[in-house]
Image (cartoon, coloured by chain):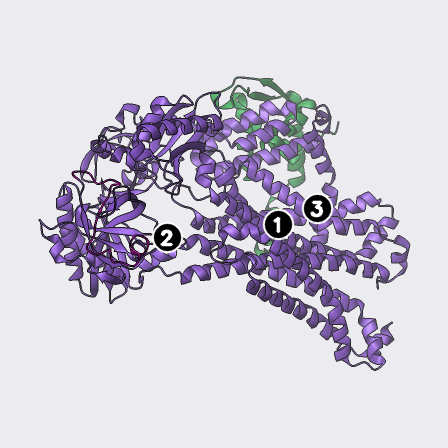
Chain colours: A green, B purple
Amino acid sequence: MSVTIGEFEHLLLLAVLKLGDEAYGVTIRRAVEEATGRQVTAGAVYTALGRLESRGFVRSSPGDTVPERTGMRRRYYRVEPEGAQVVQRTMRHLEAMAEGLKPRIARLASQSRERG
Amino acid sequence: MAAALRPPRLARWLLRQLLPPAAREFVLGDLDEEYSRYVAPSARRGARAWYWSQALRSILQTRETEPVMFQSSPSLIARLITFAASIRADLRIALRVLRRSPGYAAAALLTLGLGIGATVAIFSAVNDTILRPYPFPDPDRIVALWESNQERDWHRVEAAPANIEDWRARARSFDDIAFANTYPQTVSLVTDGGPRPAVAAQVSGNLFAVLGVPPLLGRTFRDEETFTPGLVMLSYDTWRLAFGGAPDIVGRTIRLEGQPHEVVGVMGETFEYPLSEADVWITPAGLHRRRQSIWWRQAHVFRPIARLAPGVSVSQASAELAAIAKDLEREHPDTNKAMEAGAGPLRAFLVGDRGLTLWLLLAAVGVLLLIACANVANLALGRSTLRQQELAVRAALGAGRARLIRQTLVESLVIASGGVAAGVAFGFGGLRAIAALYPPELAPPVFRLDVRMLAFVLSVGAVTTLLSGLWPAWRAARLDTTRHLGDGGRGGSTSRRRLVAANAFVGFQVALAVLLVVAAGLMVRSLDQLRRVETGVDATNVLTFQVRPSVSTFPDDAARARFAFAFEERLSTLPGVEFAGVSRGLPLTGYGWTSDFTIDRWGPDRFGIDVRHREATGGYFQALRVPLIEGRLFDARDLAPDATVPVVVNQAFADRYFPGESPVGRRVVFDRVPAEGSYWYPIVGVVGNERKDPLAAPVPEIIGHIRGDVPGTLTFVVRASVPPASLIAPVRRALAEADPLAPLLAPRSMEEVAAASRAETRFLMTVFTIFALAALVLATIGVYGVASQAARLRTREVGIRLALGATSAVVVRALVWRGARVAVIGLGVGLMAATAASRFLESQLFQVDPRDPATLVLVAALMAAVALAATFWPTWRNAQVDPAAVLRSS
């Protein structure tokens, strides 16, 4: 079985795992933004999580609301075993590929920065 | 405060409309929560921008990737979005094409950006002044009330307090009637940092209730407090800036004019009635003592406003007021003769003629935008000639006609969007200039992105896209594929036909430019006329300022009079001062009272109505160099305690009421019929006319010695042999000795006062001149561009003619004339349009005929010269070719 996911989806799965019981739109979005320093929109988070859910990697359930949400409920996410597997697999692939390459990558990366 | 944390309403509305239903709860809820919890509290400024960016991008991202969800709710907007997403390919091509021709893109962007920027700035003013609802509940139900009097030539003036009280008691059309004094009154406010001038607005106790605006802190005045002294309400800015936003401000006692006042409340930031610059609101308690006097029905000092009762229309209310005014005329014939009353919507009343001015500016800027669009269309047309081969290839490869049209239109769209973005940025700056046009009752406009503004900007973008892109797109669709694939693009009859279109654009541009240049020319002449008006005073080297002697030190009229004379004396001893004087108000500021009067030895039925009167000292006339024509000015003998209070009259008064004789020695009384206790003022002199405002002819005027009625605010005028500004510091020191509690108010040179009276005309002139110059430049570029294209197309013809022996001068003359013809036609059309349109300008002109022949001739000559030069240069350059080379190349 060769199921793959993109970098963004990977980040989302990790965020949901990290956040545990507190994983819903706002916290997930902020976690990814903090980790990457890129601006991520609520729309993108929603779309990607929907895709992950349709593939059975996460499961969502409607939860509570707070006054600021004017009655709109939060949607909490949990990672399913299949999701954890795909994360594990992707990370393993990356690690296998990067085996012994770390010094070289670091050197090359710093060079390219110098050249501008 | 909680309101400030609510996300931008428009962005939220868009989200609600455009998100796929399944995403709505999730995305909207998340964004609301995050906005109010994390983003807004920590980054107030960036918060709205953050929300907008999140909203717009979320809409695109959820749309793009979820077409299935999308089809389940195919609303019109949703379908439009799908269409927009499908032309992304076109967009990408357009961007690539534009990146390859940066010169063209920059020229088009700049042209449209300037045009749109000016349009956005003017529309912001229109939006803020005319369209945006007032921040009151049901603003349409608020009306302004007025009195008019044909006999006195009063038009919608302020009402007398007694009449307002009677209206309030009798009228059934209103929920309630409130009133306010709309003249800014400067008072001294003691703050934590010492005394400072503050603008006070006097309002009736029920004003806030009638407007329906709650306070930010504390309470507002109550109905029964209209004549209660010692109460004050603070504006938001005064609370924040003068009292450091103290949370316990309500209930504190502060000193206003040296008197203790209790702060009952603070108004919110947006409340600015009756004056946009009001720092404090106070009650008209001081007037209470005059309630029993005839003054109460004679002094037209308050602007009444009212809230209409449910179901009552403005015209019904106005009719009822008119009927009550008729009754009051019968009941009080001495004060209310010919006095009418009426009501009208508050907005229309406040905006008045300014509304017309703004629409006029919007029309002018629209013309400029049209010229800009024509230029961009011409640029695009020129490019489409160059791209004919590319387009032909695409057509041959199967691109449909619609597809080609769309591609060209998308390019225009890209340029127009860039222009809109640049324009909104330019518009911000332009707005600040417009603020000069605004009187104190109206707040100067600011740029607000509301629904109306957004709709306007979007439609301007759409219109510019169509105007600048439609014609080139149509041309693109009519390509003759086979011919262009064969031909090297040298262009035969197609290019000629294109030239016809370009010429039409140029004619159009020249006509529009003429229109704007004529308008600017008329405004320039108008300002020139205004500068020449004899104001009757010599404004050079005169310093003016105001002082309100503190009530605690100078409690009554007599004490204030002593202060005035002593300080006038002190001022004239300052180094560099030639004369110093005191008065009530300044010339050219429109300030003053009017009264009825009669003269001794006039018959019992003879009286004058509505003559202007004010008070001054003799030094006032000397300081402003108002000439003494007859008799004498006020002097030291008038200060003796037992001396009668004298008056002087102006030349206009003498001419009107004493033709052929001298008024000096006669006596005047300010009543229609002198009564037992009436005061007879002897006329001791005749002085020259001063203008009350530069647009009006001099009116008869009586100027009494200031001893007779000492105003609370004393206006000083000081003539100096040194620059007036250098006197401010010594004057301030002298004032600090004479009355340490009184701040020096509004120190200005008389020249500044005179310039301010022309500010509106000057502003209009500046704006029209800028528009006209921009139009001229754009039209010149248009003429030049077409002339160079025409010249290029005729290279062969020129070569042949030269080879056959024609001199280059002959060839140039023939071609220039051919090229200039279209400009001449445009000029003719423009002049006709200008004469037709100029009547709209008439109300803005001062002593200038809207069809002023000198202006029209001058503009025609200027335009013709510019068009000729722009045609001549490329044609002449082209005639310098080597005929042999040209003939060889073909």
Answer with mark 3 or mark 1, whichever residue precedes in sequence.
1
The answer to whether residue B118 of the structure is visible from this angle is no
Residue B287 point in image, percent of width and height: 23, 34
Q: Position of residue B605 (x, y in %)?
A: 28, 41
Name the front one of labels 3 and 1. Answer: 3
Instruction: Decide: is B385 above or below B36.
Output: below
B744 or B586, which lies in front? B586
Q: Chain of mark 2?
A: B
Tell me what residue is drawn at x 65 percent, y 67 percent.
B864
Name the quadrant of the N terminus of chain B.
top left
Q: Residues within 10 Å of mark 2 (few under 14, many from 20)?
A: some
| Circles 3 and 2 on the same chain | yes
The reply to whether the magenta stretch includes residue A116 is no
State which chain disc 1 sits on: B
Q: Which residues are magenta?
A: B654-677
> Can you give x and y, in whole percent of width and height, for residue B726 in the image?
25, 62
User: With B881 as the anchor, is B851 left or right in this view?
Assistant: left
- Disc on res. A57: none
Task: Identify the residue under disc 3.
Answer: B466
Give the quadrant of residue B248. top left
Q: Which residue is mark 2?
A: B693
Q: CA distance from mark 3 to mark 1?
A: 14 Å
For the residues labelled 3 and 2, the Cα–Cα distance comes to 47 Å
Are circles 3 and 2 on residues that touch, CB within 8 Å? Answer: no
Residue A115 location in percent, x, y? Answer: 59, 57
Residue B419 circle label: 1
One can see residue B126 in this view? yes
Say what amino acid the circle numbered 3 marks: Leu
